[in-house]
Amino acid sequence: MSQSREDYIKYIYEHSQNDQLVSNKMIAQGLKISAPSVSEMIAKLAAENLVAYTPYQGMELTDSGRQMAQDLIRKHEIWEYFLAKELNYNQVEVHELAEVLEHATPDDLADRLAVYINYPEKN
């Protein structure tokens, strides 16, 4: 899956509160993307069963979309932990690098890295 699609999934996950739907406008503003581009991507994500979209109301992640978002966030947090604790990057560098690395990290690598750094998994 492309980084762009993963960014949408992660954004929707992080901005859906109390089961409220996330609007196209929120995504466009948050990701600094044009409204037509958001509509196009949401249609693709809905076709892949990653979001459930209700026209003029907004969207929410499906179970598979929510799982994908949680996996991305886990990878991001593992990379942040590794970069800060093992390589002594500062907080700004850590976030920027982890944002890139989360998209390029296979699940197996994330699992092995978590074991290597004794990452404190969250429940």
Image (cartoon, rainbow, N blue to C red):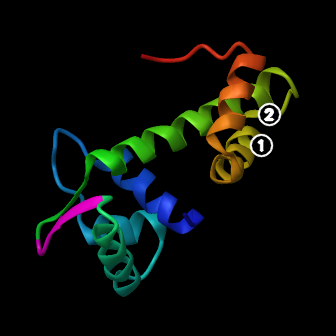
Q: Residue at x 57, y 67 (%)?
A: 2
Q: Which residues are magenta?
A: 51-56
Residue beneath disc 2: 90
Q: Quadrant of the C terminus?
A: top left
Outermost residue toward the bottom? 36
Quadrant of residue 74 within the rendered picture: top right
Q: Main secondary structure of the magenta part?
A: strand
Q: Residue at x 67, y 36 (%)?
A: 108
Q: Is residue 66 above or below residue 81?
A: below
Residue beneath disc 1: 93
Is there a contact, CB below 8 Å, between mark 1 and mark 2?
A: yes
**Helix, strand or loop status at disc 1:** helix
Q: Residue at x 76, y 17 (%)?
A: 117
Label 2: how many Cα within 10 Å (few below 14, some 14–19, many 20+):
few
Q: For residue 58: magenta?
A: no
Q: Quadrant of the N terminus?
A: bottom right
Q: CA distance from mark 1 to mark 2?
A: 5 Å
Q: Is residue 92 above or below residue 57?
A: above
Q: Is residue 118 left or right of residue 5?
A: right
Q: Residue at x 16, y 43 (%)?
A: 19
Residue 86 pos. (x, y %): 85, 22
Residue 61 pos. (x, y %): 28, 52
